[in-house]
Image (cartoon, grey):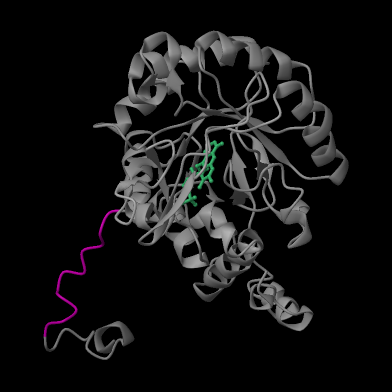
């Protein structure tokens, strides 16, 4: 690990003072989190490793790697490939299975005092229902995130999230199997023609809110071997390359659903990026790929965001959520017109 990635105590103290007066809390369907910055599923395991680089109890929540019913070793290697401004992965949902997860990971997170959002994944609707049932009477987490970007073995491997009907069936099953008060976030795939249609189907099926977005399906061919770079051939694209797609998805879903909670993610690696998602309509943001070269990124992004809000005179993070959707103010005169009186404004000379 490069030393440059780990800020010194002095730097960190200075950074932690940025925006110290800003209320960074956010409300996700009645669950109030002290910070709107979360980890992204699959990029922080169950938080244990990242805890060496930042205090995970200071984050809004740790969103855990999607857990399945049974232990899985995932796909064959190689299963990661660097791409311009991003990376491609085909991990294949490696994990210990729900029983071990509850006993070890969830218990550790609760004992550590971290807030947790548990991500679940399955290959059939019934598997999702059984996962929900296993978690039903277990405390120690704030919400469920349902990763529906998985192949449906009962439907020729078609991804649940790519069809309204199958997406809704999963969410309906999870809703039925869960406590009625449990917030459920459906994590959607951007690989669809109309993200609003899928969001509509999962909300009708009982999702409280949505997480946007999962990775985009991509592929890299190694020109030395003249073979696909990943053993799994295709993989999920993440990192800054996907950010405009993610911001667009958040924007479109927020326009269609002014009141549902949205967790936004995709290529966030700075406070500016996080702010962009909030302005588009996200109530919270998840940081994924950025942690692979800066394991303290979620804490750094929290402080950068607080600094940006403070610079803009904003006292509560909620004030900027969806702010970019406000109607344009008609000044009645173009600020660039000579004699408009606006010529001396800073933004004109910039
Ligand atoms: C290595 C890796 C593993 C991932 N595993 C999961 C997962 O288990 N469940 C899930 O819902 N999303 C998973 N994702 C997707 C991320 O949670 C996130 O939605 C996506 O990568 C976009 O955010 P980012 O660009 O900040 O990484 C994974 C992403 C990466 C890079």
Decide if residue 13 is on the left or right side of residue 79: right
Picture mark count:
0
User: Vertically, is 177 above or below 89?
Assistant: above
Q: Nearer the viewer, residue 292 or 115?
A: 292
Is 156 drawn above or below residue 112 in the view shown?
Answer: above
* Residue at the extreme front of the image, as rendered: 225
Q: Which residues are magenta?
A: 327-337
Residue 309 falls left or right of residue 18: left
Query: Can residue 48 be seen in the rendering of this structure?
Result: yes
Residue 342 appears in which quarter of the rendering?
A: bottom left
Q: Residue 178: tell me if it is visible.
A: no
At 76% from the left edge and 83% from the top edge, which residue is drawn?
A: 10
- Residue 347 within the segment the image draws in magenta: no
Q: Residue at x 33, y 54 (%)?
A: 244
**Quadrant location, the C terminus:** bottom left
The N terminus lies in which quarter of the figure? bottom right
**Percent x, y of residue 329:** 26, 62
- Residue 24 is situated, as x and y percent measured from the top left of the image, at 63, 58
Residue 267 image position (x, y, % from top left)? 44, 55
Q: Is residue 333 magenta?
A: yes
Prevailing secondary structure class for the magenta stretch in the rendered image: loop
């Amino acid at each position: 690990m490069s030393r440059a990635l780990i800020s010194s105590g002095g730097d960190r103290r200075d950074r932690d003072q940025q925006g110290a007066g800003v209320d960074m809390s956010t409300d996700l369907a009645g669950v109030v989190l002290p910070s709107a910055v979360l980890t992204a599923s699959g990029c922080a395991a169950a938080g244990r490793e990242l805890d060496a680089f930042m205090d995970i109890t200071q984050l809004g929540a740790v969103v855990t790697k999607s857990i399945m019913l049974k232990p899985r070793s995932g796909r064959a290697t190689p299963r990661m490939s660097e791409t311009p401004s991003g990376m491609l992965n085909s991990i294949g949902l490696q994990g210990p299975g729900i029983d071990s997860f509850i006993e070890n990971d969830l218990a550790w997170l609760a004992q550590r005092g971290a807030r947790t959002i548990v991500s679940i994944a399955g290959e059939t609707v019934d598997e999702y229902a059984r996962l929900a049932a296993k978690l039903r009477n277990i405390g120690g987490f704030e919400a469920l995130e349902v990763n529906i970007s998985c192949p449906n073995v009962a439907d020729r491997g078609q991804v649940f999230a790519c069809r309204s009907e199958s997406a809704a069936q999963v969410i309906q099953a999870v809703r039925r199997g869960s406590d009625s008060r449990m917030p459920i976030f459906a994590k959607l795939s951007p690989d669809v023609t109309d993200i609003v249609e899928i969001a509509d189907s999962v909300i009708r099926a009982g999702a409280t809110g949505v997480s946007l977005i999962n990775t985009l399906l991509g592929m890299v061919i190694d020109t030395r071997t003249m073979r696909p770079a990943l053993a799994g051939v295709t993989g999920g694209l993440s990192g800054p390359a996907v950010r405009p797609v993610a911001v667009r998805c958040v924007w479109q879903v927020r326009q269609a659903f002014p009141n549902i909670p949205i967790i936004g993610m995709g290529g966030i690696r700075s406070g500016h990026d996080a702010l962009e998602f909030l302005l588009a309509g996200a109530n919270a943001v998840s940081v994924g790929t950025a942690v692979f070269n800066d394991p303290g990124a979620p804490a750094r992004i929290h402080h950068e965001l607080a600094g940006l809000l403070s610079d803009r005179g904003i006292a509560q993070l909620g004030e900027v959520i969806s702010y970019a959707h406000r109607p344009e103010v008609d000044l009645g005169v173009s600020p660039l017109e000579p004699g408009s009186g606006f010529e001396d404004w800073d933004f004109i000379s910039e």
